[in-house]
Image (cartoon, rainbow, N blue to C red):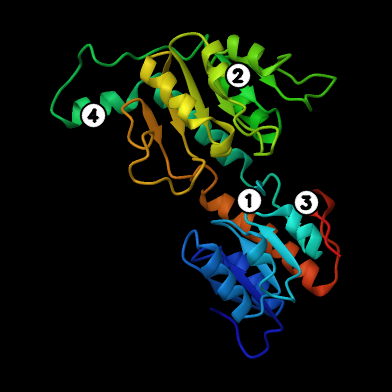
């Protein structure tokens, strides 16, 4: 906890820390911050929210469910430390009149770079080659490094991050297509519009997910889509774990139809230690850190802090950050 006797508001942060710039903004506005361990359970978070009579939650790691939202009668806003809001029970927030905000664009460049890094690493077979070298071996027949130039990249989603990935991929000589019901009618430079997910999958050597997790996108990369991809293709997910059917991906990897995958996210986070994709020989895993660069952390923290301060002091929240209006 930080703050002093002049504090007027209590803010619970679902993580052990926030950027110093964000903390300074909130303390100047009279907020006391109360931190949690990473990914607190609903019971732990509810107890803290109730005990400090939280006015706001700065949500970074873990679920903010209906029980948490109802734990403090004075709770007015949940500000996401990032872009995705699937960790928050939006329906419950709406019923309770609690505003939900997000930080659009705060980590676009970082996530796009991470997606491209995973793509390059799995196409170039870095994980198997690294294991061979670490074990004292050298070049052999167990790994195969492929050209990136000329590969067809399919983007699941054509928002800010998808477009940023497209720019990077084009520079590497990839051909880029995208499926997105919201694909602009006027088109997008360097991106061909796919008519359906199956059409995108069938014409992609690499599928990369860049869509929010919703009822419509859950499992959007599933068994049918993976089967439609060419044999020996690749999957990258830096969006949300639920957009990829993990059981279907495992089966496709085991059969050899999918050559490799790069995953920064899982349906359950953190995934259990024995999760079959966590240390699969043809899966490169990073622990949901695509957007966790120094610059992005400042952007996400400051944008969330600005939303909290606006709500608690009665000023307007920027419209592009508003997810649930509250009342």
Residue tagged by mark 4? 131
Instruction: Determine crowd level at label 3: few under 14, some 14-19, many 20+ residues with C-alpha closer than 10 A.
Output: some
Residue tagged by mark 3? 323
The label number, if any, that marks residue 242 in the structure image: none
Q: Secondary structure at mark 3?
A: strand
Left of 81 or right of it: where is 140? left
What is the count of numbered marks?
Answer: 4
Location of residue 74 in the rendering, given as x and y in whole percent from the top left corner: 74, 76
Q: Nearer the viewer, mark 3 or mark 1?
A: 3
Residue tagged by mark 1? 82
Q: Secondary structure at mark 4?
A: helix
Q: Depth check: 167 or 235 in front?
A: 235
Residue ID at (48%, 25%): 248
Sequence order check, earlier mark of 2 and 3: 2
Cα separation between marks 2 and 1: 24 Å
Residue tagged by mark 2? 154
Sequence order check, earlier mark of 2 and 4: 4
Residue extending furthest left? 136
Location of residue 4 in the rendering, given as x and y in whole percent from the top left corner: 61, 87
Cα separation between marks 2 and 3: 28 Å
Q: Secondary structure at mark 1?
A: loop
Residue ID at (62%, 56%): 81
Q: Nearer the viewer, mark 2 or mark 3?
A: 3
Query: Is 70 rendered above or below residue 123?
Result: below
């Amino acid at each position: 906890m930080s703050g002093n006797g002049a504090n007027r508001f209590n803010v619970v942060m679902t993580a052990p820390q926030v950027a110093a710039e964000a903390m300074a903004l909130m303390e100047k506005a009279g907020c006391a911050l109360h931190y949690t361990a990473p990914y607190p359970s609903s019971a732990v978070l509810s107890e803290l929210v109730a005990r400090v009579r939280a006015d706001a939650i700065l949500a970074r790691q873990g679920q903010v469910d209906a029980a948490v939202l109802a734990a403090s009668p004075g709770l007015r806003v949940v500000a996401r430390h990032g872009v995705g809001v699937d960790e928050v029970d939006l329906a419950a927030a709406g019923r309770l009149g609690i505003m939900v905000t997000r930080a659009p664009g705060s980590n676009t460049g970082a996530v796009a770079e991470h997606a491209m890094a995973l793509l390059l690493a799995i196409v170039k077979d870095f994980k198997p080659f690294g294991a061979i070298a670490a074990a004292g071996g050298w070049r052999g027949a167990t790994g195969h490094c492929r050209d990136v130039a000329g590969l067809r990249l399919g983007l699941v989603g054509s928002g800010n991050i998808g477009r940023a990935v497209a720019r990077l991929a084009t520079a590497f000589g990839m051909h880029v297509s995208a499926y997105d019901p919201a694909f602009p009618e006027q088109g997008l430079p360097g991106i061909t519009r796919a008519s359906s997910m199956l059409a995108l999958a069938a014409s992609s050597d690499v599928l990369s997910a860049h869509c929010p997790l919703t009822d419509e996108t859950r499992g959007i990369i599933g068994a049918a889509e993976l089967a439609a991809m060419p044999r020996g293709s690749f999957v990258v997910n830096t969006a949300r774990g639920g957009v990829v059917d993990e059981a279907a991906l495992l089966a496709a990897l085991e059969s050899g139809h999918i050559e490799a995958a790069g995953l920064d996210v899982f349906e359950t986070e953190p995934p259990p230690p024995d999760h079959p994709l966590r240390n699969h020989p043809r899966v490169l895993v990073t622990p949901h850190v695509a957007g966790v660069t120094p610059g992005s952390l400042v952007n996400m923290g400051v944008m969330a802090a600005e939303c909290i301060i606006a709500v608690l002091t009665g000023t307007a929240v920027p419209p592009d950050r508003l997810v649930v209006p509250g009342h």
